[in-house]
Amino acid sequence: MAKIMLFIDGTWLYANTARLSEVFGRAEYRLDFGKLPRVLAEEVGSQLGVTGVDVVRTYLFASIASNHDPLDRDLVGRRQDFFDMLKEEYHYEVEVYPVDYMGKRLRRVDRDPADAFEPKETCVDISLATSMLYLAAIPYAYDIAIAVLGDQDFKPVLQHVRRLGKRVAIASIKDSCTWDYVDPRDEARVKDFDIIWLDDLLSELELKYDPHYLPCASPNHKGPREVYTKFHPRKGQKFYCDDCREERSRQQEAQRQAQLTAAGSGEAAPEVGATRRGVVKVLIKGKGYGFLQSDDGLNYYFHFSALQGSISFDDLAVGEKLDFVVKEQAGPSVNGSAERVRRVQ
Ligand SMILES: [Zn+2]
C-alpha cells in the first residue's frame, strides 16, 4: 500500500482561507482539518487507480506572533488553540515558528498608519522543504508526498524529492498558485499527478458542526442533563450548557466586584504622586488591565501601559509584589489608579 505524507504550508493556507470562502460563496467557510488528509489521499489514490492509500503523517508548518501588544492576546491564544487542536484531535505534526511583533498590534489596521513595521516570518518555508526532503531520503518513510502549498519557492524541493524517486502531488488553490505547479505540461518537473484544487473539494472539506445531545458537566445544572448543542468538545474537555456558563460568569463578576469593594470602600487614596507598595490582586488578561492592592488595603486600577522596566503584562501573576505611584484618587469601584508600576527594588 502506498504510504503518503502531507506537507502543509500553514501560513499560505491561512492567508488564502478568505479566497476559499469567496469560491464557496459563504463568508465563513471553514476547512475541516480532520478530513483534509484523507480527502486529498483519496484524490491521489483515484489518480493512481488504487483504492488503498495510507496516510502515515501530516505535517503543518506555520508561525505565531510573539512579543506582541497584550491587547492581541486573545487572537494569538486562539491561533495557539488551533495548533493544539490539530495535534490533539488529528495527530498532526505541527511546527510553529515565532514572529517578533516588537510589542505592536497584529493587524495593520490597529497599528499607527505612519508605522512602517513589517512582521518578518522566518523558517517556515525552509522547515517544510527540509522535512520533505529529509524524509524522502529516509528509506520507506513515504512513497508519495502531498504538498499543500502554492508558493514558487518550493519548486527546488519538489524537484529534488522526485529525483530521489518519490512521487509528488500538489494540492493548491486557484489564483493562489504559481504557474510552475499549474502548467499541465509540467515543464518544471515538479509533480506526478494532476494538480488537486482545494476549490473543487470545498463541500467535501467543509467543517460542519451538526447539533447533537451532550450532558452538561455542571453540578448546579437544572433540568434534563442532556442538552441539544452545536458545541463539540475537544478530547478531555468538559461541556457546560449556555445557562450554566452564563451563571458562572455572573458569579465570577460578582466575586470580582466584591473583592474590589470589600477593602477600603469610601476611603480616599493617598494624595496623587505618593509611592505605594502592593500586590497584584486581579488581572484582566486579554483586556490589558488589572488591579493592585496596597499594603494598607486600598485598591488601585492600572493599565498595562503603566508598567515600567522589565515587567511584561503577559508574565505578570496575581500575588506579585510591585511598587507604584498614585496617579489619581478614586476610579470605577476602586480607591485610585496607579502609574509607574515597577518591580520592588
Ligand atoms: Zn448546565
Image (spheres, rainbow, N blue to C red):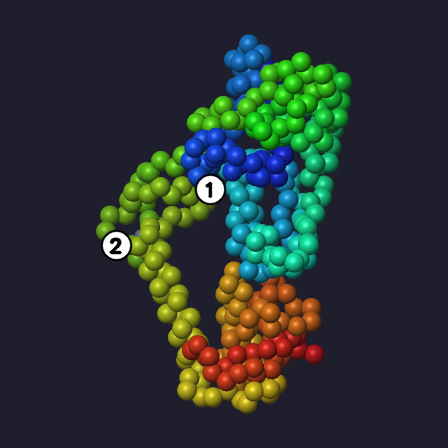
- Write the residue at 72% across / 41% down: 123
- Write the residue at 42% across / 43% down: 233
Numbered marks: total: 2
Mark 1 crowdedness (10 Å alpha carbons): few <14, some 14-19, many ≥20: few
- Left or right, 30 with respect to 194, comes to left
Circle 2: residue type: Lys
**What residue sits right under mark 2 in the picture?**
222
Name the quadrant of the N terminus. top right
**What residue sits right under mark 1 in the picture?**
235
Q: Which x, y percent locates residue 115? A: 66, 57
Looking at the image, do the residues carrying marks 1 and 2 touch, with CB atoms under 8 Å apart?
A: no
Relative to 243, is 320 above or below?
below
Q: Is residue 93 visible?
A: no
- Write the residue at 60% across / 16% down: 194
Name the quadrant of the C terminus. bottom right
Relative to 329, is 172 above or below?
above
Q: Which x, y percent locates residue 259? A: 43, 75
Assess mark 2: CB under 8 A from ligand 1? yes
- Write the residue at 60% across / 87% down: 274
Q: Which x, y percent locates residue 254? A: 37, 70
Q: Is residue 175 visible?
A: yes
Image-quadrant location for residue 8: top right
